[in-house]
Image (spheres, rainbow, N blue to C red):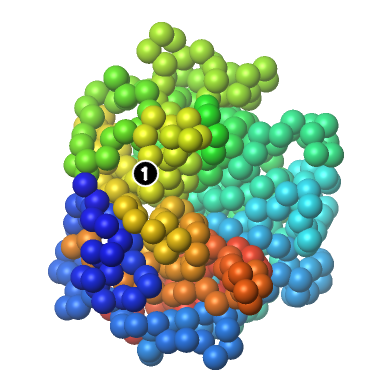
Amino acid sequence: MSATRRQILARTGALGAGIAFSGALSELFAGTAAAQGLGHVGHGPLVPDPNGLLDLPKGFSYRVLSREGEPLRSGEGAVPSHHDGMTALPGGHGRVHLVRNHENRPTATHPVPAVEGLTYDPAGKGGCTALTLDAHGRVLDERVAVAGTAVNCAGGPTPWGTWLTCEETEDRAGTNGYTKDHGFVFEVDPADPHRTGAVPLTAMGRFQHEAVAIDPRNGIVYETEDAFLEPFGLFYRFLPHRPLGGAGSLRAGGRLQAMRVPGVPDLSPVQETGASFDGVEWVDVPDPLAAQTPVRLQDFGPQGVTHAQKLEGCYWGGRCVYFVSSFARSADGSAADHYGQIWRYDPAARRLTLVIVFGPDTDVQLPGESPDNICLAPGGGLMVCEDGNGAQYVFGVTRQGEVYPVARGRQNIGTPEAPEWGEFAGVTFSPDGRTMYVNCYTPGTTFAVTGPWRG
């Protein structure tokens, strides 16, 4: 079972910062430089930022690349609100394309500006923006990449260099003023957004999408569904008709299936790391467009399918796909409570394994619960954005399971008497591994962090 938060704090010496969890992280980083381990944990204590934006370890520095409300360099309007999932893709001549989601609802202060040829639903306020950075990390361009979508939360990069952005809603036309149905995945080409346009990938399902990951060997797409209240979400796979076919190929359609773990209707009660389940099955989704019934409520036969609360981050590593359940609460209808899990699915073995269980066992007001966006750091290690109560951190995790703070948000969105801090999201690294990019959700801010990253 997981250690308590206070045990982690005592072990790491990180006052006020730590994640309590248990698990075998070494397998997350097998075959990478992380297998060599680190000489010591982390990069030292965080140094308070005199500008009140971002605390970092000594020797590290940040640049603010973009803030909501400022003018887009393209002249298309203001930088939209609610910076969320993000990826960094290589461009020519050492350039980097950052593709950034905006999880905007109809009430967003700064919607994604509507651009001809890139707007799906004029009533949608969400979408993506794309930043192009030169070889020195300077912003060359910032523009709309897709608009008219809704609640763009996370997504995932493709092997061919585009971004799949996911709508975390299933609102229909006529709801909240929308003129079209929502709940889809859209492909975004940051180098040429008009190449991909604003076309929903309908065969990939209409539900509360969170994130995706693609098996680079065969093109199978794995998808998470972030359903907060019962009935909870499902873990899906999409078998494209044109696997690994490049930009636009997912429009050709395919087959959507939901995961069934025999005898396990809900993942939340499984809390012993290393617990494995063989013989995982995949069941065809009767109606991927959810014309009458939300997908997670459809009839999957007498054995049903496996549900889980708050399925969020999803990524491919080695020969397996990993996905996050941010938390589970029995008060919401889950079979058991937990503060975060990371699961691994091995397609070749048809085996699902619980890799990490997060804490805390005590004091939920301290940082560390509710893992959200996660990425593998180049050279080894795991970076975790938390989305919980209290102070907000980006944490690093070594393969030995040791946790250390990487960054702390300092932008107070509450009051001096009752401070609050916006969550982190979209953590990702530049293709050369020298820069970590991360978003503050509110106020929307994109940071580039450089320093003595080891490994």
At 53% across and 49% down in the image, what residue appears? 155
Residue 415 lies in what quarter of the image?
Answer: bottom right
Looking at the image, which residue sits at the far top? 302
Residue 4 lies in what quarter of the image?
Answer: bottom left
Q: Position of residue 206 (x, y in %)?
A: 61, 31
Q: Position of residue 251 (x, y in %)?
A: 60, 35
- Element assignment for label 1: loop
Q: Considering depth in this image, is 164 or 412 the residue closer to the camera?
A: 412
Looking at the image, which residue sits at the far front? 417
At 72% across and 46% down in the image, what residue appears? 149
Q: Position of residue 392 (x, y in %)?
A: 49, 67
Which residue position holds label 1? 338
Q: Name above or below for residue 364 compared with residue 213.
A: below
Q: Position of residue 248 (x, y in %)?
A: 59, 42
Q: Mark 1 is on which residue type?
A: His
In the rendered image, the quadrant that contains the C terminus is: bottom left
At 67% across and 17% down in the image, what residue appears? 292
